[in-house]
Image (cartoon, grey):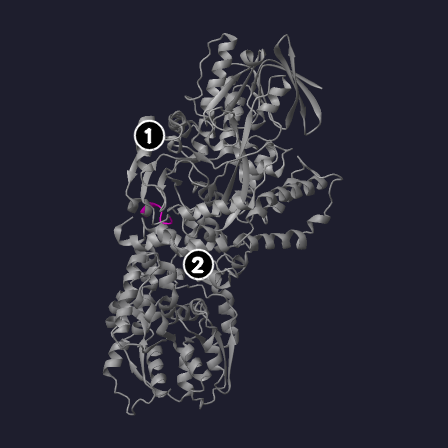
């Protein structure tokens, strides 16, 4: 085990997720809800890999098949006894991979790096990512499946748009918010970030966008705990620098989850900076719903006559806030939002990109892809980036963040 | 009636008897072992699972300490499959006398028990749940041992040397003629058949029941004073090394990681009847308090099961008869020739699991001397079947095994990762066995659900195997659940209550276990 992975792994070896296994009564509810176990026998299921197998681990993870867990977190969400099943699995995986972390898993955790490299050469990158021979080589050399969805390279980053755009003409009336765009929202999902700040400004807020790094989620889900812990704390410093006690808003659902609970519960990051940021951050749809419930959200929405499928991503559900997008979009006249009812789209961050997991991820998402196509062949809505890419790639239906719809209904686009 | 004739009858299927029958067989005698229940069902299967380093006795009982250290090394080698070389710590608790550790280190040196003081920081690094307020820590070579595998290993080795192992054979009478033992009568409890075994010698290894056996041969009363000890198993390994309090031996001062659980124990109370061992609520509380000293938060951890065992201590005039804790843990061979004028029988008492092989060597040496024969003991030199590789057991083994066969076989007991094949193989070798007999070899139903999910699966598979009919299947299931309950109710608090409630709904509500087809009388064996 290299020194760089040690502290997080020591935590993984013996901290409170392990103690929570005492609460397991073997009811098997987690296994009935696990989207991966439902489509492949290769994964033994969350109860097996989590509270059961953990009793056999003594600093060693001999059950390599636990890597088939996609870390979607559904098991922890549905457990009626409070067992931290997904956390146990993620910790055991980190211990297991510590000695032989594949190059691919190191690479795909480097989301910032990917963005910085692709943005200046966006047209070339876009072409390369759609080029079969290149993707075949990529699959063979790096282990990223040739048909897996890839981030859409953009010609301009959010930060550069933000710096160059004309400032709002009217003064803010509602106070100041900090915007956290995340790596994907900075490099690939630039439009979502733009629309998010435009909606917030439309509502009368002053928006601050501090220089910001990566939350480390992709590293964490690939078992690189030490690097991920450093990334998340660095990000906390970035966001705290924008101002004390300000509410932080994000339209990057999974990165929000990392800050709210995953960094602490999975890697044991126990730091005042994380607690501060984790309690101040709000998902943008959650924030809009809070405003609405306080009677502070203008509902002068234009009518949008449309039926649109909506999929709530796993990492949004894990935040324990229900489905705020469904409630907010319900305020738009004419708009019918159909909740997918699907557990998971299959991608689970970087899981569905890996060549050995690609087929599984496709099988997991199949019911969702079918539902989306049937509900509206032209548009679907989903809160997190990689899930949108997965749905769009596999169903052929354009998939947007729900904030796009709000943006449109306010007449901003 | 069935008749047999052998050189030596060994009575008692605990560790001592199994060790003795192996030794007798390896020295070339024909032999039969008689056990009234299953192997290792008495004292052997009801203790900590601690393979002593000797550390426990370096101050209080130096001879035992040296014997333990030597036997620990031998057993870890010849029965590697049954033993996990976990290592152990002796730690001085926050309120314990730190000076005892000096006496300990001195004693360890004098008795040849490997021991080394380490920093408290190192101990906490290796065992993070340990009480951070401990004052000193000494590292020793404690291990953990599966008592049932140890006994079955010895028995299988004996069988390979021609011995016959008769379980569920209860001794009813011992014949003597002209001041010499001539035959042992017993009943096969499974079919009621009487068996008479003519023999030249009887080795009484019945542990806490040795007095009852000696009396059958007409010997003067042998004062075996059963010392009752209780143990509580916790849901997972709170420590990965044995942790002992570094104090003069007392109650609840050892925590042992055995397989997937950790076991806290024990108490020591004199009892009259080794067949009637209560698990007193106040003793359970005492164990939980003692656990709290070693591992803060121990009481919040999930307890799975409690049990009681009886130590076979031979009365020693040096201490009061009520103080069983401080009677010699050393072994004693009773010579009935000089004591009772009875030839052809020896009784052994005292000792401990760790020294079972040495006890066997002593009593068989004594027998050879009486028979005027020179046959030397080889039990320390030869690995028993299954342990030839010399690779010690690791807690990760079953998880690794299932990793290999999980796509080809079903898992019947999920907590203890017992596959269907493991169960059907064991059933084939013991078609008349109860589920508890199979449990002792497979750990069926010994995990968190305590049989809630696996016992009905096992019942269905057993019925399908054609070894039993539907009535016996129900009877076996109910017997198994009844026996699990004995160890469950004394620790019903916290997480295990929810499990028990769920299990109860499954059995009463879904399966209606009270009204399944069942035999006219309850199945007892």
Residue positioned 39% across, 43% down in the render: B240
Q: Chain letter of disc 2?
A: A
Q: Secondary structure at mark 2?
A: helix
Q: Main secondary structure of the magenta part?
A: loop
**Farthest-out residue, right:** B520
Against A2, residue A330 (above or below) is below
Which residue is painted at 28% across and 89% down in the image? A168
Nearest the camera: A329 or A281? A281
Can residue A152 be seen at all in this image of the molecule? no
Q: Which residues are magenta?
A: B125-129
Q: Describe the element under mark 1 as helix, strand or loop.
A: helix
Mark 2 closeness class: few <14, some 14–19, many ≥20 residues within 10 Å: many
> Which image quadrant for residue B78?
top left
Q: Residue at x 44, y 43 (%)?
A: B400
Q: Quadrant of residue B199?
A: top right
* Residue B310 appears in the picture as rendered: yes
Q: Are marks 2 and 1 on the same chain?
A: no
Q: Quadrant of residue A143?
A: bottom left
Depth-wise, is mark 2 or mark 1 nearer the camera?
Answer: 1
- The front one of B289 and A333 is B289
| Residue highlighted by disc 1 | B107
> Mark 1: few, some, or many residues within 10 Å (few <14, many ≥20)?
many
Image coordinates of residue A324 in percent, x first then y, are 46, 77
For this view, does A269 lie left or right of residue B382?
left
Nearer-the-camera pick, A411 or A280:
A280
The image shows residue A374, relative to residue A64, as above or below, that is: below
Q: Chain of mark 1?
A: B
Residue A86, labelled with which disc? 2
């Amino acid at each position: 085990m290299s020194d760089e992975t040690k502290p997080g792994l020591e935590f993984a070896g013996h901290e409170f997720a392990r103690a929570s296994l005492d609460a397991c009564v073997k009811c098997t509810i987690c296994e009935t809800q696990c989207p991966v176990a439902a489509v492949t026998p290769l994964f033994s299921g969350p109860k097996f890999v989590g509270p059961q197998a953990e009793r056999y681990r003594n600093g060693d993870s001999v059950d390599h098949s636990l890597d088939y867990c996609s870390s979607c977190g559904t098991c922890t969400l549905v457990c009626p006894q409070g067992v931290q099943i997904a956390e146990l699995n993620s910790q055991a995986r980190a211990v297991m991979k510590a000695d032989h972390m594949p190059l691919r898993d190191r690479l795909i955790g480097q989301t910032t790096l990917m963005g910085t490299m692709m943005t200046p050469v966006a047209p070339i990158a876009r072409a390369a990512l759609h080029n079969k021979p290149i993707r075949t080589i990529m699959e063979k050399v790096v282990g990223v499946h040739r048909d897996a969805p890839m981030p859409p390279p953009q010609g301009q980053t959010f930060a550069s748009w933000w710096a160059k755009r004309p400032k709002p003409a009217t003064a803010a009336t509602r106070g100041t918010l900090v915007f956290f765009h995340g790596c994907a929202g900075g490099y690939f999902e630039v439009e979502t970030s733009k629309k998010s700040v435009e909606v917030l400004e439309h509502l009368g807020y002053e928006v601050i966008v501090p220089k910001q790094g990566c939350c480390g989620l992709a590293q964490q889900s690939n078992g690189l705990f030490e690097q991920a812990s450093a990334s998340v704390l660095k990000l906390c410093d970035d966001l705290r620098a924008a101002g004390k006690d300000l509410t932080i808003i994000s339209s990057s659902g999974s990165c929000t989850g990392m800050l709210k609970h995953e960094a602490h519960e999975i890697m044991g990051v126990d730091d005042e900076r994380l607690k501060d940021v984790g309690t101040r951050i709000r998902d943008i749809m959650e924030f809009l719903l809070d405003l609405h419930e306080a009677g502070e959200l203008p509902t002068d929405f234009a009518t949008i006559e449309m039926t649109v499928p909506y999929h709530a991503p796993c990492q949004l559900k894990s935040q324990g806030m229900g489905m705020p997008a469904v409630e907010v979009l319900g305020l738009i006249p004419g708009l019918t939002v159909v909740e997918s009812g699907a557990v998971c789209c299959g991608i689970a961050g970087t899981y569905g990109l890996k060549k050995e997991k690609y087929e599984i991820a496709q099988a997991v998402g199949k019911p969702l892809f079918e539902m989306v196509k049937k509900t509206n062949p032209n548009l679907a809505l989903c809160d997190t980036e990689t899930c949108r890419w997965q749905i769009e790639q596999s169903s052929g239906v354009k998939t947007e963040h729900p904030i796009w719809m709000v943006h449109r209904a306010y007449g901003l686009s | 009636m069935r008749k047999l004739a052998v050189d030596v009858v060994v009575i008692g299927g605990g560790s001592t008897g199994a060790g003795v029958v192996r030794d007798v067989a390896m020295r070339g005698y024909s032999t039969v072992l008689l056990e009234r229940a299953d192997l290792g069902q008495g004292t052997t299967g009801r203790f900590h699972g601690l393979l002593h380093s000797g550390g426990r006795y370096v101050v209080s009982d130096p001879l035992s300490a040296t014997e333990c250290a030597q036997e620990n090394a031998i057993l870890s080698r010849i029965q590697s499959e049954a033993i996990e070389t976990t290592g152990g710590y002796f730690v001085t608790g926050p309120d314990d006398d730190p000076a005892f550790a000096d006496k300990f280190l001195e004693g360890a040196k004098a008795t040849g028990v490997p021991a080394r003081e380490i920093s408290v920081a190192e101990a906490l690094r290796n065992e993070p749940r340990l009480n951070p307020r401990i004052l000193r820590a000494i590292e020793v070579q404690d291990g953990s041992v599966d008592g049932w595998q140890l006994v079955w290993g010895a028995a299988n080795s004996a069988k390979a040397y021609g011995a016959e192992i008769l379980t569920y054979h209860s001794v009813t009478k011992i014949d003597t003629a002209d001041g010499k033992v001539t035959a042992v009568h017993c009943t096969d409890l499974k079919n009621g058949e009487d068996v008479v075994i003519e023999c030249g010698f009887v080795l009484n290894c019945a542990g806490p029941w040795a007095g009852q056996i000696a009396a059958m041969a007409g010997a003067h009363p042998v004062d075996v004073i059963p010392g009752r000890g209780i143990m509580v198993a916790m849901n997972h390994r709170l420590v990965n090394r044995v942790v002992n309090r570094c104090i003069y031996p007392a109650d609840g001062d050892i925590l042992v990681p055995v397989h997937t659980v950790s076991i806290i124990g024990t108490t020591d109370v004199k009892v009259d009847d080794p067949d009637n061992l209560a698990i007193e609520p106040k003793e359970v509380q005492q164990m939980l308090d003692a656990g709290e000293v070693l591992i803060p938060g121990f009481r919040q951890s999930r307890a799975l099961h409690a049990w009681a065992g009886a130590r076979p201590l031979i009365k020693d005039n040096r201490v009061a008869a009520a103080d069983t804790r401080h009677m010699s843990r050393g072994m004693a061979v009773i010579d009935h020739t000089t004591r009772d004028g009875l030839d052809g029988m020896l009784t052994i008492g005292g000792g401990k699991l760790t020294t079972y092989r040495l006890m066997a060597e002593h009593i068989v040496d004594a027998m050879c001397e009486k028979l005027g024969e020179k046959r030397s003991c080889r039990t320390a030199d030869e690995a028993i079947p299954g342990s030839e590789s010399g690779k010690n057991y690791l807690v990760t083994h079953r998880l690794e095994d299932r990793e290999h066969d999980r796509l080809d076989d079903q898992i019947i007991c999920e907590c203890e990762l017992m596959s269907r094949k493991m169960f059907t193989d064991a059933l084939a070798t013991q078609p008349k066995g109860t589920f508890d007999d199979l449990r002792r070899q497979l750990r069926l139903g010994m995990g968190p659900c305590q049989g809630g999910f696996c016992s009905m699966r096992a019942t269905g598979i057993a019925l399908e195997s054609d070894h039993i009919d539907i009535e016996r299947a129900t009877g076996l299931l109910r017997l198994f659940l009844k026996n699990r309950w004995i160890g469950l109710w004394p620790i019903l608090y916290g997480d295990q209550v929810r499990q028990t409630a769920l299990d109860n709904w499954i059995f009463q509500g879904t399966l209606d276990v009270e009204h399944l087809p069942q035999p006219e009388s309850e199945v007892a064996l």
